[in-house]
């Protein structure tokens, strides 16, 4: 399976949200998937069940596949992703998006995930989040 998280030598984790969407469409929805889309509190509790010895980027990848959902908005998924990244002590996350978010969406993401977003390309499809 193609991974949607890369770990560069500069300690910058990159998450390809487009690849995640593709991978998650191939998975079957379970009862737990339905519950987590209704009760976002499940997202952080999942971190305690991760195997030891994994890198932060590997943990983020596995958690994203379990926590993010195509049944919620992209904005809410990115907020959840940034909260997961913070829980894994990732201070900077680059996210490849399938399309550019509107300014209102970016503002909501910044305020709810307590981070600073920077657009890395003119199309607005690559953003970097710095955790505050």
Image (cartoon, helix red, strand yellow):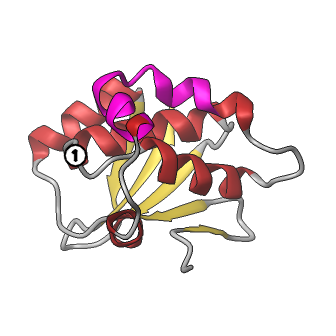
Who is closer to the viewer here, 8 or 21? 21
Secondary structure of the residue carrying numbered label 1: loop
Q: Residue 41 appears at what percent x and percent y?
A: 44, 19
Q: Quadrant of the N terminus?
A: bottom right
Q: Residue 49 appears at what percent x and percent y?
A: 72, 34
Looking at the image, residue 65 lies above or below residue 77: below
Per the image, is 81 magenta?
Answer: no
Query: What residue span does the magenta drawing correspond to?
Result: 32-46
Taking the image as shown, residue 17 lies to the left or right of residue 2, namely: left
Looking at the image, residue 46 lies above or below residue 29: above
Q: Residue furthest bottom?
A: 2
Neighbours of disc 1 within 10 Å: few (<14), some (14-19), many (20+): few
Q: Would you say the magenta stretch is mainly helix, strand or loop?
A: helix
Looking at the image, residue 97 lies above or below residue 107: below
Name which quarter of the figure residue 24 lies in. bottom left
Which residue is at 55% across, 26% downward?
Answer: 44
Q: Residue furthest right?
A: 53
Name which quarter of the figure residue 61 lies in. bottom right
Taking the image as shown, residue 40 lies to the left or right of residue 131, namely: left
Residue on which disc 1 sits: 71
Which residue is at 74% across, 41% downward?
Answer: 50
Q: Residue 5 appears at what percent x and percent y?
A: 57, 66
How many marks can you see?
A: 1
Q: Residue furthest front?
A: 31
Q: Residue 78 appears at what percent x and percent y?
A: 34, 45
Taking the image as shown, residue 122 lies to the left or right of residue 66, namely: left
Which residue is at 35% across, 21% downward?
Answer: 39
């Amino acid at each position: 399976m193609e991974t949607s998280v890369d770990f560069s030598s500069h300690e910058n984790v990159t998450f390809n949200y487009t690849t995640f969407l593709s991978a998650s469409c191939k998975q079957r929805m379970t009862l737990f998937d339905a519950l987590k889309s209704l009760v976002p509190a499940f997202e952080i509790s999942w971190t305690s069940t991760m195997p030891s010895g994994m890198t932060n980027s590997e943990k983020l990848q596995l958690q994203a596949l379990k926590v993010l959902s195509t049944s919620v908005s992209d904005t809410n998924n990115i907020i959840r992703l940034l909260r997961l990244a913070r829980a894994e002590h990732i201070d900077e996350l680059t996210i490849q998006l399938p399309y550019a978010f509107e300014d209102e969406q970016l503002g909501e993401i910044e305020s709810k995930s307590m981070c600073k977003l920077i657009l890395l390309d003119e199309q607005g499809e690559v953003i970097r989040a710095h955790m505050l």
